[in-house]
Amino acid sequence: MDEKKVEKGGRISGTVTQVNKSDILLFYENRAKKFKEENPYAVTMFQDQNPQLVRDRNKRETEKLLPLLLLDSDSKILDVACGIGRWYDAIDTEIKEYCGVDFCRELIQIAKTKHQDCRQADFLTGSAMELESVLAGNGKGTYNRVLMIGILLCFNDEDVRTVLEQVSRVSEQDAILCIREPIGINDRLTLKDFYSEELEDHYNAIYRTRDELMDMFEDTLLSAGFQLEKEGWMFGDELNNRKETAQYYFVFRRKS
């Protein structure tokens, strides 16, 4: 890594910096309080002042990634960091099971309320760091489709590996894993106690580069038998309104 560079407002580039887990949880608890029915997905996609961008990004993302999941009637989906169940709403195929897990109890409560009539969907409160015990404690088994949408930026490096190792263990031998993550385009960027005027709150996140993430995948997912099948930028310039970060996706598959 380059020598540490600290920028104005809690922006740190070029080095590994720790973020505080309790601050991140508090941020998402505050986000849940801002939930609005007319712009529901903004609660986790942000862009509070631009509901059309939220709709466009959600549409583009789900249309691009859903076909790569190869969903069918035997699909059992685990959605890690499910928020209010945005991805469950996008599923247009009959599946066997959906389980969403999120560390924010308030977001899970919104998800449960929104989907109370959906019999094949369960929403559980729990940290991805304790994924195995959360699933086991709720009588859940293993899954053949796993979603990790915008979650790794909330964890410090050593915790990312812990999460990925647990994900690999709760995945069946034949499984597809989709990770969509905002990444640093040219360099790692950490926002630490950064006050966002747009979100009206302090924000903490780690935007790793693609190569940094691949190093983490190498000794977790790849060593557990997953292979990288597809990757790429999520949006074009028309839907990306940041200069230093952009959404990127990885699709892994493990076969017996």
Image (spheres, rainbow, N blue to C red):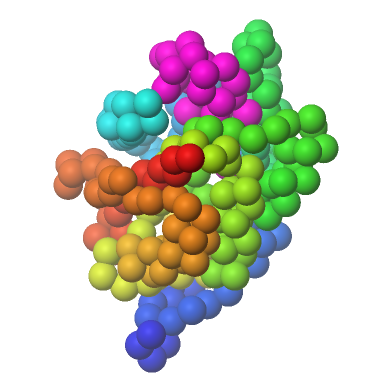
| Residue at the outermost front position | 256
- Please say if 68 is above or below 167: above
| Residue at the outermost right position | 137
How many numbered markers are drawn? Answer: 0
Residue 153: % across, % down: 49, 58
Residue 110 visible in the displayed image:
no
Tell whether 245 sits left or right of 215.
Answer: left
Residue 61 visible in the displayed image:
yes
Residue 119: % across, % down: 66, 11
Report the front residue among 119 and 77.
77
Report the front residue among 57 and 234.
234
Tell whether 7 sits left or right of 23.
Answer: left
Residue 196: % across, % down: 46, 57
| Residue at the outermost left position | 237
| Residue at the outermost top position | 117
Asked if residue 113 lies in the magenta stretch, the reply is no
Tell me which corner region of the image, top left, top right, bottom left or bottom right, holds residue 164.
bottom right
Tell me which corner region of the image, top left, top right, bottom left or bottom right, holds residue 177.
top left
Q: Residue at x 72, y 46 (%)?
A: 132
Tell whether 35 sits left or right of 208.
Answer: right
- Please say if 88 is above or below 183: above
Tell me where the magenta segment starts and ends, as one range. Answer: 71-99
Query: Which quadrant does the N terminus fall into?
Result: bottom left
Q: Residue at x 57, y 63 (%)?
A: 161
Q: Residue at x 60, y 57 (%)?
A: 165
Residue 209: % across, % down: 35, 66
Q: Residue at x 68, y 55 (%)?
A: 129
